[in-house]
Image (spheres, rainbow, N blue to C red):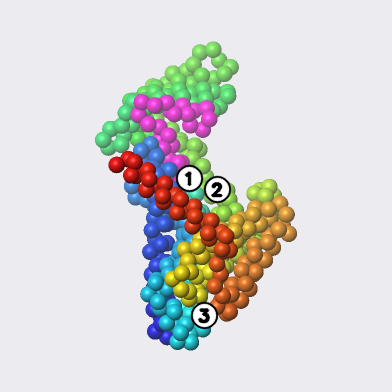
Amino acid sequence: MGSIGRYIFRTTLGAFLVVLASVTMLMWMTQALRNVDLMTNQGQTILVFVGITGLIIPLLVLLIAPIALMIAVGYTLNKLSTDSELIVMNAAGMAPWRIFQPFLAVGIVVALVVAAISMYVSPKSLRELRRWATEVRAEVVTSNVQPGRFAVVDGRMTMHVRGRAPNGQLLGVLIDDARDAKERVTILAEKGSMLTNENGTYLILENGTVQRHVATQRDPDFIAFREHAFDLSRLAPTISFIRYSVQERFPWELAYPPADDPLYKEQPGNFTAELHNRITAPLYPLAFLFITFAYLGAPRTTRQSRTMSFVSAALAVSVLRGIGFIGTILGAQRPITLIIPYLAIALTFVFGTWAILRGLIIEPPAFVTNTITALADGLSRRTAATSGQAQ
């Protein structure tokens, strides 16, 4: 790769990183706002909030990277064309395929990153997200019980606290436990605090009474206590028995799932479809690259619109990705349709290579360009007329 190739590589890779970081951050913020209740309602720290919501970033990168590569390639080619560099390189005898090589190098880098995320990083982060979220929501008193509110826990148990002391101690604790049909237990205590050790998680209650009402007896029994330990471990989901979805499984778990896996018994087709979706994920950045360069890579005069070519490339990319989604969705029920994404990607590589080698200028039909231009001009005139009347 010569100096021109290195220049194109740096420009394209830099643009890709800027677009990827910007869009990923924007998408992450919109997703993070959905989980802001971790701080407002569940009392978690900002570090826990950022940590949990940040685990979705690999999945966002997986979805955004191919589109970011397309935008970066379009930006670089437009820059080279605006500065007449494409025309100079073509006049100097540089073949289109040679110009394409540094773009292909960037595409291979992006494809390798997407492959690593798809095969390991994304399922690993999603599993960690599920585990961490389960642990956070397993903290019953912190997550479900807020001062002044009655919270139903585990179906038939109600908890209430009057307030919290500055040190986190609970004040005015009420627990009404009706989970056992044979016995109902109601506990009132002045104070309560959390204790976690190797035996489990307990709510240590101070200065209160326990009312036990056995279903076969008419009157309840009252017991006063100075200190009482209420076991919360049974209320928390067991972390070792988390049921991971197909998106949270590693490729080898999708390819060779245990025969007694309950989810595999219910949705065997989803395992196969997700595995093929992981395999095709690294191919989409390269396919988007071939489409974008085929539409924008050839040098052209200022009379030939690059905007319409970019719009056409975006439409072609949308169609290709839509075909991939449809093939994956249908593949869960009809495995034969899983071949559709592979065929679409293969055809993209074949026709893209053919167009690049021949240096074809791919443009939409003239009537489409003229219609869009006429609509844009009409809209501009109406906007100008409206602005003039307003003044």
Residue 362 in the image: state x and y as whole percent: 56, 70
Judge whether 290 appears above or below 316 on screen.
below
Along the horizontal axis of the image, is 238 left or right of 34? Answer: right
Residue at x 54%, y 19% (from the top left corner): 214
Q: Are marks 1 and 2 in contact (CB under 8 Å)?
A: yes
Residue with the most extreme left position:
166
Front position in the image: 287 or 180: 287
Q: Are marks 2 and 3 in contact (CB under 8 Å)?
A: no
- Quick one: SS at disc 1? helix
Report x, y in % for residue 7: 39, 78
Residues under labels 3 and 1: Cα distance? 53 Å
Per the image, is 280 magenta?
no
From the viewer's side, name the closer residue of 363 and 68. Answer: 363
Whether residue 263 is situated above or below residue 186 in the rendered picture: below
Question: Left of 248 or right of it: where is 13?
Answer: left
Per the model, the C-alpha gap separating discs 2 and 3 is 53 Å
What type is the residue that disc 3 sits on?
A: Pro
Asked if residue 282 can be seen in this view, the reply is no
* Mark 2 nearby-residue class (10 Å; few <14, some 14–19, many ≥20): few
> Can you identify the residue that label 3 sits on?
96
State yes or no: residue 149 in magenta.
Answer: yes
Mark 1 — residue? Answer: 134
Q: Which residue is drawn at 73% across and 54% down?
A: 334
Q: Earlier in the sequence, mark 1 or mark 2?
A: 1
Kindly identify the amino acid type of the residue bearing the numbered disc 2.
Answer: Ile
Magenta-drawn segment: 132-159
Residue type at numbered disc 1: Thr
